[in-house]
Image (cartoon, grey):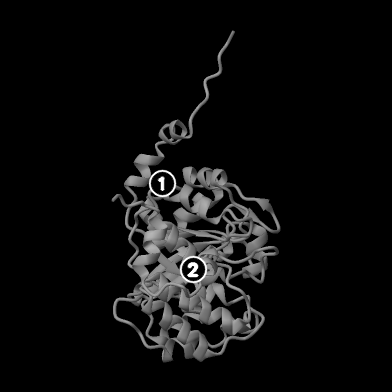
Amino acid sequence: MNVIKKTTWLEVINKFHFIRRLSTLPDIRIYEVGPRDGLQNESKFVPTDIKIELIHKLAEAGIKNIESASFVSPKWVKQMSDGMDVMKKLKRTPGVNYPVLVPNLKGYESAIKCNIDEIAIFPAGSEGFSQKNLNCSVEEGLKRFKQVAEQALKDGLRVRGYISCVVGCPYDGPVNPKGIAKITEELLMMGCYEVSLGDTIGVGTAGSVQRLLFEVLKVAKPKDLALHFHDTYGQGLCNLLAGLEFGIKTVDSSISGLGGCPYARGATGNLSTEDVVYFLYGLGVNTDIDLVKLNEAGRYICNFLGKVTESKVNRALSDRFKNHNDIIKIASCRATGK
């Protein structure tokens, strides 16, 4: 009689080398997209002074990269129509990066007037989404963004690339990872220092993220990539863990899980910054971000919007803690002996 040996969970972990990988995680860089990606789909207009105060609070919490504005046409995204005022009036904290999103040369010409150091360009990973979001094909979009990247690099700016719908598209369905790898390669050749892989509608799972990265890492190194997950199906942190195992060290997130896209049916908020920071502290990764102040920033913007935070960590912790180190102790779940 054949005896089936039960596999323990620890054996499964060892089989896939999770322990080895997690013990050698690099320092993780948080790239906050709340003031731009988080707010762009909100129906209630957020005044300039509220946006600026949110950015200030995020910087005070220790966030070093805060995507602060977008220079897309106000006709299409009214919420971002005050980008120039935001960038000119915000008080910049030394050591903090305040990138902006630009769609074309016209947008770039406006952005360059605002004392910026970094821009982000955003081709789509699918034809359907490219037509809806950019009103052109993927190839045409890449040509437009190449012009923007060339000018920005000439002006001494850093250029970051986003790819939307890297796993699934609301119009085309599943997206071929090989196509995403090709777009990634083109963005790096344009001079992008980093390419953020965005699961815009949040349909990804750990398995589909792994399949994606197996292809993308044929043309890029982990240091060239960032992970950008929406949490529509509650898979955000699972997908993040799957990506971190490949050595990627930059994570996009949005304060209190704000977000969505006007051209992506079914897309809900981004992975919450509070949840990501708590998750990373649990892995032993010190982000140097104060979770007490971060939670305060989340409550600030959610109170203005009149909505409950989508961050489970913010809901659980509320305002019960005044000391950041007390939250870290909870996240680490390490018992102390007598």
- In x, y percent, where is residue 329? 37, 60
| Amino acid type assigned to the residue bearing label 1 in the image | Phe
Give the mark, 1 or 2, whose residue is nearer the N terminus: 1
Disc 1 to disc 2, C-alpha distance:
31 Å
Residue 71 seen anywhere in this rendered image of the structure: no
Mark 2 surroundings: few (<14), some (14-19) or many (≥20) residues within 10 A: few
Relative placement, left or right, of 103 versus 58 is: right
Numbered circles on residues, count: 2
Q: Is residue 16 above or below residue 337?
A: above
Give the labeled residue for mark 1: 246
Q: Nearer the viewer, mark 1 or mark 2?
A: 2
Q: x, y (%) of residue 8?
A: 48, 30
Up-down: is 180 above or below 110?
A: above
From the top left corner, tell me how far across and down residue 74 is, in percent: 61, 84
| Kind of residue at badge 2 | Leu
Q: Which residue is mark 2?
A: 317
Using the image as rendered, state which of residue 249 and residue 18 is in the foreground.
Answer: 18
Q: Nearer the viewer, residue 276 or 167?
A: 276
Q: Secondary structure at mark 1?
A: loop
Q: Which mark is residue 282?
A: none
